[in-house]
Image (cartoon, rainbow, N blue to C red):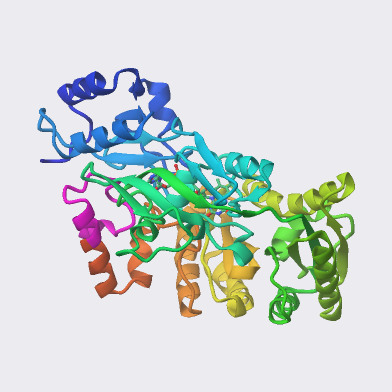
Amino acid sequence: MPQPRALAPDLLALLACEFGADLLVDEAALCARSRDESGLVRQPAAVLLAKSEAQVARLVSLANANPTGHSFAVIPRGAGTGLAGGCLAPEMGVVLDLTAMNRILDIDTRSLTATVEPGVLTGDLRAAAKAKGLFYPPDPASLATSTIGGNAATNAGGPACVKYGTTRDYVLGLTAVLPTGEVVRAGANTRKGVVGYDLARLLVGCEGTLGVITGLTLKLLPHPGAAACVAAVFADLNAAMRAIIAIMTRGHLPSAMEFLDARCLKLVGDLLPFRVEGDASALVLVEADGDPEQVRREVEAIEAICRELGAANILPPAITGTKEGDEGREAVWKVRRSVSTRIHEACAVYIPEDIAVPIGRIADMVAALPEVEARHGITIFAFGHAGDGNIHLNLTAQDEAQRPQVEAAAVDCVRLALALGGTISGEHGIGLVKRGLLPLEIGPASLKLQRGLKALFDPNNVLNPGKIFPAEQE
Ligand SMILES: Cc1cc2nc3c(=O)[nH]c(=O)nc-3n(C[C@H](O)[C@H](O)[C@H](O)COP(=O)(O)OP(=O)(O)OC[C@H]3O[C@@H](n4cnc5c(N)ncnc54)[C@H](O)[C@@H]3O)c2cc1C
């Protein structure tokens, strides 16, 4: 069946009959689902605001075959905070909005698990777990607005990754509607399980191309008693990286380890309680969590390492548990969280890259950036997760006419990361935005296998088509 650019009237009538008021076709509803945070815009032909797994399965089944003979694409969508265009409708398909399936069904304090629907907000789950003394560690910076289903589909991570891992490490089991409309349960409710192929780990991170996640069983941990953050300014990024490597190789396992390069520091330096000297200064934030006494010892040791390695300024760590400590820690994290917004505010053109390199190569990666800037006449801000080598490069220019140069510089950065043994995306995924770059990292044999998997799961190519794989070979 040819893929229509818009849904035929008889197909729309069929869907309206099947889903009633849950099928949305008004301009406001379509408009609200026409973008994510990638900057791309694709208006869908219709939206299903799903209320149940049965509705999801029915929609996907109809996409494969229905009495009108017209096919359509189904595009799963959580909160639309994605940065890769993954939830956008490329062929005027039907966006499957999962935000109304947002119940926390159970927090099991005996098994330390949570059972949730996909539309639960990450922050809501973390708060519900905390209220029972439990901890859901994945902490993407978007956690107040992103959904657990979207986090699982993109294998989201955040600062806590360095100690706790990514979303994938917390998905014990999941239920998914396959692209054929069948429902599968993958993984288990247990902390271990080696029965058959690990379909849960395959579905996590597949960006909604192999299945629609309709339920998740998540691993929880005991909530750490306290956390504290050390903020240290170094003369340059090399000095900062030496401190980071020393902290990790001297037996410490921080719960976050972030850095800001000199450009970023200039943008947010006013939020620090001291003046930052020098043009090349870099900021390192290191957090420890656990038992309060252990945290105190840990941050003292980390502070000592920073001093030994030449930190110019150190903000004394504030330990959570008191009003003053909570506020102190929040103030430090505000510095880190303000970076993206301030870059956005300061630059007309802005492309966020999220390459990752082995942690020992972060300084090499950042040292190579001035040449890229000079070649393309653009400005690059570098910050991010020093503990796992995931650098957020924000490529910017002051004039929309320079967008092609910014895009060309982004490709150079990706090539640089690969040359240093890195990867083209640490956490944001491929979606539409990076699919042309996929063959730079994935060899022909792997690409063929991955395309084969997509075809096996989705013989009619109805679920989130056009994502991940380069367009010319679709
Ligand atoms: C300010 C900001 C900060 C961010 N910080 C981080 C960060 O620190 N770490 C990080 O990893 N990301 C970060 N992101 C990116 C984004 O928040 C994550 O990718 C997040 O996991 C997306 O969740 P979502 O609910 O918004 O999903 P959406 O954007 O709606 O969808 C993302 C992808 O998942 C698929 N999908 C969504 N729900 C389902 C489902 N139930 N079943 C199958 N597929 C589904 C979609 O088809 C799409 O491919 C940030 C984004 C912003 C705007």
Which of the pair 172/69 is nearer the observer? 172
- Residue 400 horizontal/vertical position (percent): 51, 48
Residue 473 counted in the magenta span? yes
- Residue 72 horizontal/vertical position (percent): 21, 37
**Above-or-below relation of 17 to 77:** above
The image quadrant of residue 450 is: bottom left
Does the image show residue 114? yes
- Residue 292 horizontal/vertical position (percent): 82, 59
In the displayed structure, does residue 418 sit left or right of residue 44? Answer: right
Helix, strand or loop: magenta stretch? loop
At 35% from the left and 60% from the top, the residue drawn is 202
At 50% from the left and 59% from the top, the residue drawn is 427
At 83% from the left and 49% from the top, the residue drawn is 321
Q: Where does the C terminus fall, quadrant-wise?
A: bottom left
In the displayed structure, does residue 319 sit left or right of residue 97? Answer: right
Residue 307 counted in the magenta span? no
**Above-or-below relation of 327 to 235:** above
- Residue 154 horizontal/vertical position (percent): 44, 53
Which of the pair 162/187 is nearer the observer? 187
The range drawn in magenta is 453-474
Q: Where does the N terminus fall, quadrant-wise?
A: top left
